[in-house]
Image (cartoon, grey):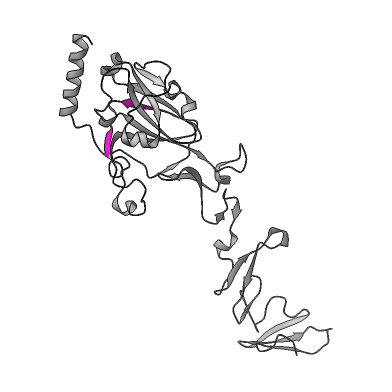
Amino acid sequence: MTTKSAFCMVVFFLQLCIVNGQGICERQMITEWRTEPKPTIIKWTPRENVCSDFYTECWNMNKSILGEISEERNLSIPQICPLQLQLGDSLFISSEPSFQSYGMNLVNVSKEEFINCPRAGFLQEQLIFVCQIKGLHQVDPNWLGVGTHYFAELHKRGPLLCNMGLRLNVTVKQQFCQQSLGAPLCSGHGKCLSHIWEKTYNCHCFSQYSGTFCQKFDICSAKPCHNNASCTEKSELSGDSYECTCPPKFSGKNCTEIVGQCQPSTCFNGNCINVTPNTFLCECDKGFTGRKHLFLLSSSLSV
């Protein structure tokens, strides 16, 4: 180690002691799937954008949400703010200039090694980059498959700075919002969303639509049945998409007809006259004969 490099290292560690780089990570609780991938740049330095409490700082979770999550509770792990990507996004690492002379690289580690910081040697195939990184480097897409990935810093010489926050949790999500390749997301009737703790993007349907891809129109949500009638969806093969179960005193397709009252087609060749709230009478037109019809609520037969 040269005198100059040793001096830079001392200055850097003094900066770590003076500068409080820990803070609350900005975090969206719910994100919407983007139609186009985007690049993300992570500054690989413990002097900024580093959090320590797994929930309240790193994920910006409040106590009400914490009560619903039991896994990894109360973890104090200094780390670069966790990152969530959608499948197809690109990731760039901007290295700390003070470390470049020490042969910096990143290594893919297990979840346990991420929490405890790696102690043992690593295989060549675990290295994220094929060479020591200087400046800005893109992470190979092969390291960004679906799931959660754990990256930690590795030096050929000098201190291991994982415990100071130089480790990164990257979660890559895919979407299940299309019936087929090229189909509109959620059939155009919903949004493709993912909560921060969900592993995938899924459809959240607009009102009156349902189904995995919001492909089904829920006609009952439009309340076609009146007078407190119940609505039941039916197979489209039956011809009608819904059926109303009417309460007493009501009938008809939408339960809008009062039993015992005149309806447009009650009397085929004559005039219908309401006698009481629950009875009616048919008076035949000239040229037609037959008995006059009186309908009673207690009977469904004409007399």
Q: Write down the quadrant of residue 127 in the picture.
A: top left
The residue closer to the viewer here, 23 or 287, is 23
The residue closer to the viewer here, 270 or 194, is 194
In the rendered view, does 301 fall on the left or right side of 255?
A: right
In the rendered view, does 130 fall on the left or right side of 18?
A: right
Against 171, residue 44 (above or below) is: above
The residue closer to the viewer here, 267 or 145, is 145
The total number of labels drawn is 0
Determine the residue located farthest toward the front in the rendered image. Answer: 120
Residue 211 picture location, percent across and down: 58, 53
Asked whether 51 falls inside the magenta stretch, the response is: yes
Quarter of the figure with the C terminus: bottom right
Residue at (30% x, 34% y) in the render: 79
Quarter of the figure with the N terminus: top left
Helix, strand or loop for the magenta stretch, by majority: strand
Against 111, residue 283 (above or below) is: below
Residue 122 picture location, percent across and down: 39, 24
In the rendered view, does 66 fall on the left or right side of 5?
A: right
Residue 224 picture location, percent across and down: 59, 66
Residue at (72% x, 62% y) in the render: 238
Against 270, residue 143 (above or below) is: above
Question: The magenta stretch spans which residues?
Answer: 38-52
Residue at (68% x, 60% y) in the render: 235
The residue closer to the viewer here, 132 or 117, is 117
Asked whether 21 falls inside the magenta stretch, the response is: no
Residue 213 picture location, percent across and down: 57, 48
